[in-house]
């Protein structure tokens, strides 16, 4: 496994140091414990804090900044962060209004954020993202949180910026999360630095359908097929789950898992768009690109969010982070 | 009794010796980071050897270890082991370290883990190793068993618990995503729990024969 | 080779259709011949048109929009576009002020753009980007154009937006191009759809040093080494070429070739930043991410541009395209 | 004389039959797209068979073909072949199609290609096939050689030209990036030029024996 790396143990910090310098206009990075915080926190707002194992970049560190997260706590690659990180981040960015944690639903993340919440000495609530429909809704520990996290963080981030209350944001976050469904497909495994290789290998004619974002196996190994056929399976699964109606407005997010080209992602977007267009569903907003990656996995996920007018307004609200930007004036690249 | 650092060393050596095997388990059922997570935690404990050795109060030492594990391991196992050690520390506060007190603390510890993980035995996790071990120690302490015998028998209990995960379906942790695909493979956390328990038991037994 | 694809022959158009829909607020796409144009062209400005083989996305299509390109002409994967595309694009976006073509220096691109320029019935000039220092400066056909193209397009794009004259822009573009140097390293080959596989394969312990962006072999096959050692070779080569002096301001661009994670790119950025920082060179601006890709190649390039005050001002000027954004107000994501 | 579509068909068949070999050449020395580029161009010409067959003026047909090649091939070879065909069309305008006129037009065509590519023989490109062929045809026409003999000999000339690229260093096109690494391998464009010339010559010869 060839990567640009000096040592597995120093990878995360060296990378964060580069991130801090490349985006010194937007963020500050603390190393012990590790968290990325936005440079200027608007006073009197609820602090939005997320985090999770590294390896999904730009999620979450790339979403720290105006209109989105106040802080992100990166764990080691694919390993949940530890409670002391969340506590330190909260201390740095939270005020009287308390903290809203946005957590992807994985045992490790849930437990570590929970410990942090218990130790925190300000009010906090947690929005659990569990958009991955690869697992049945009744799954014992709930579904996994995957690419829908970006949508939740963007919309709730905009609302937090407006000074909304903790309870309000929790309700909103849950609403976005509940209206969001994702499904992922892997064409290859990913190469985990600490393992020196892929978590799984796929024969040339197989794909992992319903794959997670940590190099876990998918729901099932399926036959490789044309893009049209693969995407059909993906969108039908989502459609069955969310059941958007004719005239409903939705956000369509096609997310690359790492090694899949933008050309392919836009092609997948086209096919998914066509499907819902035929169904009479209005694709009101869209996002195509690598936002929630699984290191260098080849593959993609499709996410659909049913939008209401408030969600659209908040999606459109200005955001200026390393990885997601629109609507802000006079914000030089890194001036 | 051996100093804490020696026990940590023994646990780490056992994990190191089986790193590949366990990584393979966590790659198949999870995300492959379990060994690295534990190694990072145990190494961090070792780095504090002097401070830990200096504390002759078990409760304080366990609390310090809990904090280190909490901030170093991460993942599911990090929060669970941190919870275990925090509870052990709390339970043993002001108490003498002996089998009975330890067994009682451990029972409380695994209860806390169940709460933290919203899980119980039979779900193909480290609890399948730890819960029977806690129960056995409680029983052994009640019966006033010889410590040498306990140290021998506890290994069999841990191993049996670990082995029991092989044919289970997983309902907690990442392995639960796999459904039937998880059957036939031992849970990584159950295996490392067993490895560490056996290593520590051996180290303690060795010490007692000196 | 597994990709999200229906057929090699339809890949480009299906992908462009998705691109058109995902960015309907910014661009319009024409299919016969193929070009992407910005939706609203400011009147009275010089039209900035670029293009090249597909497979380098987001370059160039992702750079069409306010403050950057007026149009981009994508060829087939790794194949230069044809003159009729440039002519149609010019017809769509050019006015009296003429056209500035920005062309990466490859025989095919140069010849096809040249034919277009000859057939065009308005004034035109061409800025040739040849930033790849893998080849010696005296190379018979000049050096290749690689990731430095983004820098040229951004800075010249901002100047065009200000209404500068064709000759002015040509002079500026040449100045940026001359002050820009890049070097790339591949850790793996890339999988070309039409070939059904990689253009080259690398043994586990080898890298291509000085690789191009079309899956061509690099200047030489080198030993795989630590990130520190690889980056050292890269930055030293650039440093020798550009010879920035103590106190000089530069822009540092770390570009992913496709399958390399952001984590690694930021780590490379950190190492390169540290090198020039030690040299007393001021990294005044930076850009880290996948901008000029070579399909799904694992690898990255480092680009350095020596900046003057005008170039800094133009770099900071507002831009709103699919792939590069800052500084514009009230620009919803795709509203 | 066979209709234009048949000649195109023959050229395409030759490219198809050697697709793998040539792709390997362009993968080693270039970017591997040369065969696909030519196939796309030739198929586009074939798609216009009816229109081309309807034109019995060679100049018009060549001009139409030039435009199609220009807009369909792309890459270095697209602009070069488009330039060649445009020049052929211009040169043959109002002229009868015979060996002498064709040879003269071809000479002008390869000159235009040299200008377009800023290149000449000896740089390991398709010109190493085309330039000697043009020179040979000029000579043959001057000598009033028998057309059958010309069609036989021109294949040898094309093949020799193509072969000459094997030991050259490349100074134009992508292969020039490789320096010494380019030696020992035939240039893809030189090879396809030779393949198409041979295929067309064979097709013409076949027609003449009918
Ligand atoms: N909810 C839970 N309750 C008890 N144990 C769990 C739970 N979730 C996971 N585990 C244990 O943790 C182990 C995985 O630990 P590790 O790999 O370090 O963390 P992660 O799963 O976050 O990658 C599993 O093998 C299992 O034994
Ligand atoms: N400047 C040039 N002059 C003449 N022929 C050239 C020149 N550059 C490239 N060629 C020819 O074009 C061929 C490559 O064509 P092709 O692969 O279709 O285009 P590209 O090189 O743009 O990928 C080379 O093998 C060579 O014969
Ligand atoms: Mg993990
Ligand atoms: Mg794990
Ligand atoms: Mg090409
Ligand atoms: Mg080629």
Image (cartoon, coloured by chain):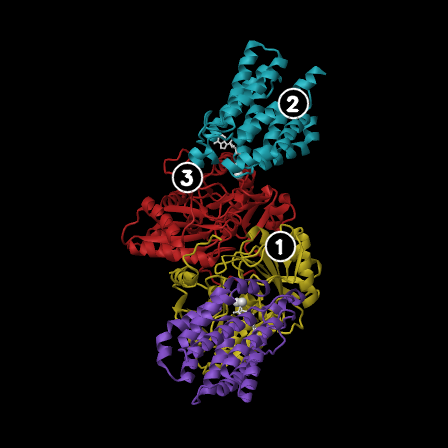
Chain colours: A red, B cyan, C yellow, D purple
Q: Chain of mark 1?
A: C
The secondary structure type at the circle numbered 3 is loop
Q: How many C-alpha atoms fall within 10 Å of the one at disc 1: few (<14), some, or many (≥20)? A: many
Task: Specify the label residue C268 is tagged with.
Answer: 1
Q: Which residue bears the numbered disc 2?
A: B57
Side of C289 relative to A5 (left or right): left
Give the image location of residue B178, x and y in percent. 44, 36
Q: State the CA–CA distance, disc 2 to disc 3.
A: 43 Å
In the displayed orientation, state which residue is furthest to the top.
B143
Q: Nearer the viewer, residue A193 or D189?
A: D189
Q: State the CA–CA distance, disc 1 to disc 2.
A: 47 Å
Q: State the CA–CA distance, disc 3 to disc 1.
A: 35 Å
Give the image location of residue A229, x and y in percent. 37, 51
CB of residue at label 1: within 8 Å of ligand 3?
A: no
Q: Residue at x 52, y 67 (%)?
A: D34
CB of residue at label 2: within 8 Å of ligand 1?
A: no
Tell if the residue under mark 2 belongs to the same chain as the one under mark 3.
Answer: no
CB of residue at label 3: within 8 Å of ligand 1?
A: no
Q: Nearer the viewer, residue C150 or A225?
A: A225
Q: Which residue bears the numbered disc 3?
A: A143
The secondary structure type at the circle numbered 1 is helix
Q: How many C-alpha atoms fall within 10 Å of the one at disc 2: few (<14), some, or many (≥20)? A: some
Residue D130 can be seen, yes or no: yes
Q: Chain of mark 2?
A: B
Q: Nearer the viewer, residue A142 or A157?
A: A142
């Amino acid at each position: 496994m060839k990567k640009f790396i000096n040592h597995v143990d120093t990878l995360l910090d060296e990378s964060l140091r580069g991130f801090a310098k490349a985006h010194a206009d937007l963020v500050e990075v603390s190393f012990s414990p590790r968290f990325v915080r936005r440079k200027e926190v608007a006073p009197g707002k609820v602090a939005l804090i997320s985090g999770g194992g590294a390896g999904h970049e730009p999620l979450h560190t790339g979403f720290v900044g105006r209109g989105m997260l106040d802080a992100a706590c990166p764990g080691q690659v694919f390993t949940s962060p530890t409670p002391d990180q969340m506590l330190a981040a909260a201390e740095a960015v939270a005020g009287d209004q308390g903290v809203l944690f946005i957590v992807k639903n994985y045992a490790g993340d849930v437990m570590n954020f929970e410990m942090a919440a218990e130790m925190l000495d300000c009010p906090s609530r947690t929005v659990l993202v569990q958009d991955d429909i690869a697992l049945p809704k009744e799954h014992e520990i709930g579904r996994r949180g995957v690419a829908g996290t970006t949508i939740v963080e963007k919309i709730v981030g905009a609302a937090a910026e407006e000074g909304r209350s903790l309870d309000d944001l929790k309700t909103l976050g849950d609403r976005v999360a509940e209206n969001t469904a994702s499904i992922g497909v892997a064409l290859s495994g990913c190469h985990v630095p600490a393992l020196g290789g892929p978590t799984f290998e796929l024969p040339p004619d197989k794909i992992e359908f319903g794959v997670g974002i940590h190099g876990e196996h998918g729901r099932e190994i399926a036959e490789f097929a044309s893009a049209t056929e693969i995407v059909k399976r993906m969108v039908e699964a989502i459609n069955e789950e969310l059941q958007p109606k004719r005239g409903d407005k939705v956000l369509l997010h096609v997310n690359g898992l790492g090694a899949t080209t933008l050309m392919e992602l836009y092609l997948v977007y086209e096919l998914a768009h066509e499907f819902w267009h035929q169904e009479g569903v209005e694709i009101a907003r869209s996002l195509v690109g690598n936002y929630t990656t699984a290191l260098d996995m080849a593959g993609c996920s499709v996410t659909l969010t049913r939008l209401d007018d408030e969600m659209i307004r908040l999606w459109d609200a200005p955001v200026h982070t390393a990885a997601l930007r629109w609507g802000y004036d006079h914000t030089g690249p890194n001036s | 009794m051996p100093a804490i650092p020696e026990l940590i060393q023994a646990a780490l050596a056992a994990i190191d010796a089986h790193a590949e095997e366990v990584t393979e388990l966590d790659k198949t059922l999870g995300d492959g980071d379990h060994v690295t997570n534990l190694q990072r935690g145990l190494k961090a404990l070792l780095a504090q050897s002097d401070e830990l050795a200096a504390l002759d109060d078990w409760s304080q030492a366990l609390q310090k270890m809990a904090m280190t594990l909490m901030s170093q391991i991460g993942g599911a196992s990090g929060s669970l082991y941190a919870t275990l050690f925090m509870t052990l520390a709390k339970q043993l506060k002001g108490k003498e370290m002996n089998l009975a007190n330890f067994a009682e603390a451990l029972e409380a510890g695994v209860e806390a883990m169940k709460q933290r993980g919203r899980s119980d035995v039979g779900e193909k996790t480290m609890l399948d190793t730890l819960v029977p071990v806690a129960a056995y120690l409680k029983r052994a302490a009640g019966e006033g068993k010889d410590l040498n015998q306990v140290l021998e028998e506890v290994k069999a209990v841990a191993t049996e618990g670990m082995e029991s995960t092989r044919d289970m379906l997983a309902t907690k942790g990442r392995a639960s995503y796999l459904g039937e695909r998880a059957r036939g493979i031992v849970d990584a956390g159950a295996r490392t729990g067993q490895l560490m328990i056996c290593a520590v038991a051996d180290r303690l037994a060795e010490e007692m024969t000196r």
